[in-house]
Image: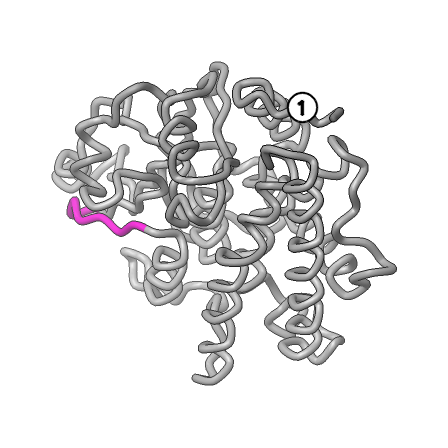
Amino acid sequence: MGIGDNRSHQLQLEARALTVQTKHRPVNDADTTSATVHVSSSARPTQARDRASDRDAQLSITSGTSPSEWKMAAAGSTPAPVMTVLGGELSPFTARARLALELRGVAYELLDEPLGPTKSARLLAANPIYGKIPVLLLPDGRSISESAVILQYVDEHTTTTGGEVRRRRLLPEDPYERAMHRFWTFYIDDKLWPALDAVSLGPTRDARAQAVADARAALRRLEEAFGERSGGAGFFFSGTDEAPGMLDIALGCFLPALRACERLHGIYLVDEDATPLLDGWSRRFAAHPVARRVLPDTEKVVRFTRFLQSKFGVDVSE
């Protein structure tokens, strides 16, 4: 979370860190124990849209295994991972990439490192333009950055290494509906996330009050979009009861931040009175087995937000 470009650079240098190395396999939606996670202590910022949508950190990989080594791994008992996500546990944009991969049944490895004063050589090699996470590394060493771009790549990556057809697509088949999902994904990053970020980290009481108003206005628009995309009856934005799609992932990755606002400030931005469709949707999305595996615990987001408030001298009692 953060407000403005200068703060963005500071955020990238600050945080207690979490070193996570997680190996994943394709899982059934009912399987909630698919990941083995190795966690030491961490914090990960959840920053605003104008930090470039997938900003929130720098990382280097601590595994010592390079993409080229994965590519060259001999077939046998230890096959190379299909894909690798460079990212952070508390990053909503990393969550986007992971949600997409798991919903599509794609095996991947998550590699995370502590935040530090310099960006790792490996991250800069993988994302030389922005130097930020998430980055999706392909088995041949090529890389893809920006969470919305990663979502679309994963959706189009339709076969496993064995040639099986993947699960239901993340984007609708209809070209117009696909365009609308992309449009509203951009809207979420452009309008909702900066406002949501400033609710906790705005420099003044007036700035934070304006952020609350802006976040509510953006969510009202998304309430309308949900009704239009799903017909008001669909389980998810896709209008089906099967599984979340691209737009569900794009908004759902921010649910921990929305819940953190409730705990920190007593502000309910999504509720059954103001946004009844989104309120029901948010509960369904959060209950999905993949979301339960991937989304960070709200309390971790609360603790990290308090850390940032202290770091930047945000006095929420003023």
How far from the left and from the top, in percent, is residue 232? 74, 76
The correct choice, above or below, for 9 with respect to 143 in the image is above
Asked if residue 112 lies left or right of residue 199, the reply is left
The foreground one among 62 and 315 is 315
Q: Residue at x 40, y 58 (%)?
A: 148
How far from the left and from the top, in percent, is residue 250? 52, 57
The foreground one among 9 and 34 is 9
Q: Residue at x 41, y 49 (%)?
A: 53
Q: Is 296 one of the magenta-colored residues?
A: no
The correct choice, above or below, for 188 with respect to 295 in the image is below
The residue segment tinted magenta is: 139-145
Q: Give the quarter of the image for residue 277.
A: bottom right
- Identify the residue at the far right of this view: 273
The correct choice, above or below, for 223 with respect to 199 in the image is below
Q: Residues within 10 Å of mark 1 (few under 14, many from 20)?
A: some
Q: Residue at x 57, y 41 (%)?
A: 197
Q: Residue at x 46, y 49 (%)?
A: 49
Q: Give the quarter of the image for residue 115.
A: top left
Q: Amino acid at mark 1?
A: Asp
How many marks are shown on the rendered structure?
Answer: 1
In this view of the protein, can residue 290 be seen by the observer?
no
Asked if residue 306 lies left or right of residue 129, the reply is right
Which quadrant is the C terminus positioned in?
Answer: top right
